[in-house]
Amino acid sequence: MMKIKKLNDFKFKGKIAIIRVDFNVPLDKELIITDSTRIDLGIKSVKYILENGGKCVVMSHLGRPKGNGYERKFSLENILDYLSYKLNRKVSLVKNYFDDKFKIDKYLKDSEVVLLENLRFYSEEKENDNNFSQKLASFGDIYVNDAFGTCHRKHASTYGIVNYIKNHCIGELIENEIININKVLHENKRPFTAVLGGAKVSDKINIIEKLIPIVDNIIIGGAMANTFIKSNGGNIGNSLFEKNNLDVAITLQKKALVNNVQIFLPNDFICSKSFEDFNTKVFDSNNIPKEYSSFDIGDQSIKLFKKVILNSKKIIWNGPMGVFEIDNFSKGTYEICNFIAESTKNGAFSLVGGGDSVASVKKNNKQKEISFISTGGGALIEYLSNETLPSLKLLKS
Ligand code: AMP
């Protein structure tokens, strides 16, 4: 199997790069960008290609359009000015490019950077349609994939396209993701602690299984913890849990025991009758009255998790400790974020990924205090589980 190529394996002078980026930035009601991180990071490869004398055809998705044509709120028009400003040059937005008669040349004559309108306006993108893949491939000489967050999806622009273009490589963003994820997986720093949260065990079974042989501790918070506590016979009241995964939770705990991995579950929870009810009470995590649900970890759990995190030399965090979107239930998640930042200051290597965890790092203004913030959610989890992703695998061939 060949090695995956990088930008510096190619000479871009006089060449056209067709580059898949993830410019899927959040927009407010007025369609103004509220967080430009994804563009700021993804633009580095575009700049590299331009600086080396190449031209770029840039493609991305934005939001979740229906897949049957133009929708104003998901149009890449919304990011065009920002992109031009950051690149300090004109960027042309092209529409209706999936048409037999369409030719990219005239747009590239006018500008060195051409932005294709939202890929997901075409249902063919998600369907990994051969004709669509071929059309996209025809726009460039070298395909660059720099959209880490979508590399776990087999879409035309991340997957099918590779079959139609011989020269292909990853961009700087993906290269950086791989370097940092490998650091957390393979650098010999101990103790290694994984902090997992969110609602669904089902999404994270594979990563827990993969982590068990390599970590020392697994901290579990959020509604995921409820499934584990219930599987151990605890009384979780009306809290959210996954009935179908009670057995899985038992098996994972047995595996952890055999591998000498300590699983830390919350010992108390902030509870109320619904998450609209701010009449909160703290209960022992094994004894929640039947009309109450847990919505955040309590102070005792925070104290317990703090000790483990501050004692760690490698930390990976994915998933909130509670319903952090609501202020009354956000303390656990923010405190975890603070402890990871503190541990990083003391020399630990920390990696945070997943929309919710990254959002809480940003809200807490701790971006600079975390060693690496991944742009992947699902992609990060899948990479951690399999040490590759479908699109990256294809780029090796
Ligand atoms: P996931 O998609 O599995 O990462 O779950 C993220 C979601 O889990 C967030 O929207 C949280 O609000 C939610 N969540 C975290 N803890 C709880 C909890 N104890 N009860 C209900 N939802 C929760």
Image (cartoon, rainbow, N blue to C red):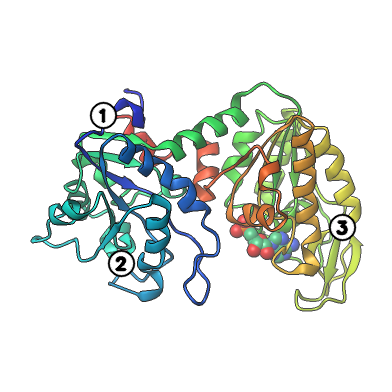
- Residue at horizontal 77 percent and vertical 35 percent from the top: 345
Mark 1 nearby-residue class (10 Å; few <14, some 14–19, many ≥20): few
Task: Give whichever of discs 1 and 3 has the lower sequence position.
Answer: 1
**Residue 129, placed above or below residue 259:** below
Within the image, what quadrant is residue 218 found in? top right
* Direction from residue 290 to residue 368 in the image, left or right: left
Mark 2 nearby-residue class (10 Å; few <14, some 14–19, many ≥20): many
The answer to whether residue 244 is seen in the rendering is no
- Residue at horizontal 28 percent and vertical 72 percent from the top: 68
Residue ranking furthest to the front = 88
**Residue 397, placed above or below residue 333:** above
Q: What amino acid type is highlighted by mark number 1?
A: Lys
Residue 298 is labelled as 3
* Label 1: which secondary element: loop
- Residue at horizontal 83 percent and vertical 72 percent from the top: 272
Q: What amino acid type is highlighted by mark number 3?
A: Gly
Q: Is mark 1 within 8 Å of ligand 1?
A: no
Residue 11 is labelled as 1
**Foreground disc of the pair 2, 3:** 2
Q: Nearer the viewer, residue 157 or 36?
A: 36
Q: Which residue is mark 2?
A: 121
Cβ–Cβ under 8 Å for marks 1 and 3: no
Q: Is mark 3 within 8 Å of ligand 1?
A: no
- Distance, label 2 to label 1, CA atoms, is 32 Å
Ligand 1 falls in quadrant: bottom right
Cβ–Cβ under 8 Å for marks 2 and 1: no
Q: What amino acid type is highlighted by mark number 2?
A: Phe
- Residue 376, percent across and down? 52, 47
